[in-house]
Every structure is written in C-alpha cells, then in structure tokens.
Amino acid sequence: MPTPRFGTFSIAAHERETGTWAVAVQSRFISVGAVVPFAQAGVGAIATQALANTSYGPNGLAMLREGASSADVVRRLTEADPDRDERQLGVVDAKGAAAAFTGKKCLEWAGHEVGDGFACQGNILFGPAVVRGMARAYESTGGDILDRVLAALAAGQREGGDRRGMQSAALLAVRAGAGYGGNDRWVDVRVDDHPSPIEELRRVFRLYDMTMLSREDPATLLRIEGEVATALQHDLGVLGYYSGRLTGTWDEASRNAFARFIGEHNFENKQRDDNTVWPSIVAYLRDRAQTEVVRRTQAAPIVPHALDRGPGVAPAGGSPSPPPTRKRPASK
C-alpha cells in the first residue's frame, strides 16, 4: 500500500540556556505527533515530514550522538535516500546549529527557513508566509522555548497553514532529568484529531503545565487572604470540598479542603505551605466550579440527588480522601 504523504508545518528548536530541544508540529493528517517529532536530550531534535521517512528520526539522532552537525545529518540522510525529492527534514544539533531540506517534488507550497537555533519547514502550505511567520514569531516571542514554539505554530496557522485545513498537532520537548520521575521527556502532548488542533494543543498543554511543570513566575503568587480566600472557599464549596462559611479567613478547614482538592486533581507540584497560591490554580478552580454550576442546573440527574453536591463530597458508604501526605517529584 502506498505510504500517505501529508502537508505539515513544524519547528525544531534548541534553547541553549536551559539545554532544551523541542519540536512543535501541525498537519491535516491524523496523529502527526506519532510521525514527525524526534528529540533526545543533549543530542538534538528532528522533524521528518512530507512523504515522511520515519527512519530519519532514530538514524539522525544516532548521527548527532556521534558528533555530526545538523548540516552533516541532513546531507547524509538525504543522499542515502532514493526518495529524497519527496522528503522534508529539519534538524537542530547539540550546539543549536540548524539545517533543513525540502525535496523538489514536495507538494506546493513547500519550503523552509533556518535561523539561530531553529528550523521551520512546511509543505502543502498556502505560501512562503507560513514558514516566514513561524520564524518571526519564534524570534520575537518572549518566554521559554515552549512559549516560543507554540507561538510559531499559531503564527503559521494565521498565515494560512496547511492549505487543506487542520487535524492534529503535537509538542515534544526534552531536557536532561526534567521529565516525570527524572526522565528526559520534559513535555510530550498531542492532539490526534480535532477541528482546531493548535488551540486544543494549547489547552492540553496548559493543564500539563499546571500538573507537571514549574514555569510560573513566583512574583505572580497570590496571598490567600481577603477576596482570594473568599473566592477559594466559595469554589471549593461548590465542588463539595468545603462546607464552612465564606469568611475570607484561611483557617484549618479551608486549608484541609484545598489540600484535598490539590491531591485529587494531581496538582501536588503546585502545593505550597506559605499561604500563597498560583494564579493558574485559582483560575482552574474557578472554571471547575463554574462548570459544576452548569452541570447542576442544566444536566438531568440519572441517580436521585446525584447533582445536589459537588464531586469532592464523600462517596456513598465511604469517606472523603485525606489530604495528600507526599508529593510527587517536581518537574524542573
């Protein structure tokens, strides 16, 4: 059976200051994250697309581990491939040098742009403005490499993106020891099929960021007092974790309710013991409470009284979960 070709735009990048490599990609193709991105901490990042040769990923990383430059990897991979004219490839090496290749038979518009520490490439695009916009967004966006590659994807879509439409997107980032349990896979999130995959990828990543990473600026921490405490008590009450009065005083009952909410939602990475809270947690809790209000007022209960109380109340015949007693390893 012929191998399907697919239109795609992607960016492979390296952040020297933190030793991070990342690939972000969008395509009118199912599960693009299972095909295009490859990366290894301390080694480099590779995007293989168009009539994608998935052997470019592991073979290219092997060459990079041996000390080959990105330009050497691109040359060696494509010279050895009889179907190179239908391939597209972007590589960033261990030093952050980037190189790319677009075969002359890739479907129009196809091309790439290489800059300091990144390579943008795409095929079956609306035009060269897609990769140009990606490059400019990556160069001009503040924040870390994750913010910048996601901005590049959004910029590419604003310029038209894949001319057949949207379907899937992915973000892969590696950094030594920064992933869950100390592995090198720092971020690995995918949207396999969605009408707006880049926006959905951003949504999924925001939740992943809250749960797994430590990227928020400590200067944004909020003191849990006054209106902040009252809002937390209210939202915890809607969800069934807190049953006291809305006093604005962060007492033991409030702290225990909040700790249980944190534990049951896997946000141990955001738990603090200094009476401060991250804005992302406040926003998430508010959104969940609002969703719960909608559920109670608009959904028809299947079990009598099932919608009368929030998900944090004691299950039938049981008791509420205790506050967590241990933290999972924090991501870096």
Image (cartoon, rainbow, N blue to C red):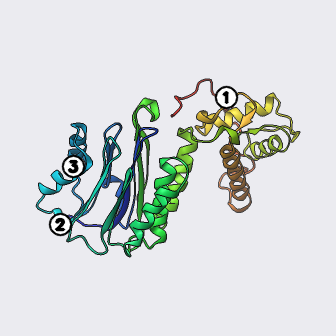
Residue carrying label 2: 85
Is 175 positioned to the left or the right of 269 in the image?
left
Residue carrying label 3: 73
Q: Is residue 193 visible?
A: no
Mark number displayed over residue 323: 1
Residue 28: name its quadrant.
bottom left
What amino acid is found at the position of numbered circle 1 in the picture? Pro
Residue 31 placed where, x, y %? 36, 58
In this view, which residue lies farthest toward the front? 116
Q: Within 10 angstroms of label 2, few (less than 14), some, or many (20 or more) residues?
A: some
Q: In front: mark 1 or mark 3? A: 3
What amino acid is found at the position of numbered circle 2 in the picture? Asp
Q: In front: mark 1 or mark 2? A: 2
**Residue at x 49% of width, y 53% of height:** 148
Q: Secondary structure at mark 1?
A: loop
Q: Secondary structure at mark 3?
A: helix
Question: 307 or 64: which is nearer to us?
Answer: 64
Q: Gap between marks 1 and 2, in whole Å?
A: 59 Å
Quadrant the N terminus occupies = bottom left
Q: Is residue 158 above or below residue 48?
A: below
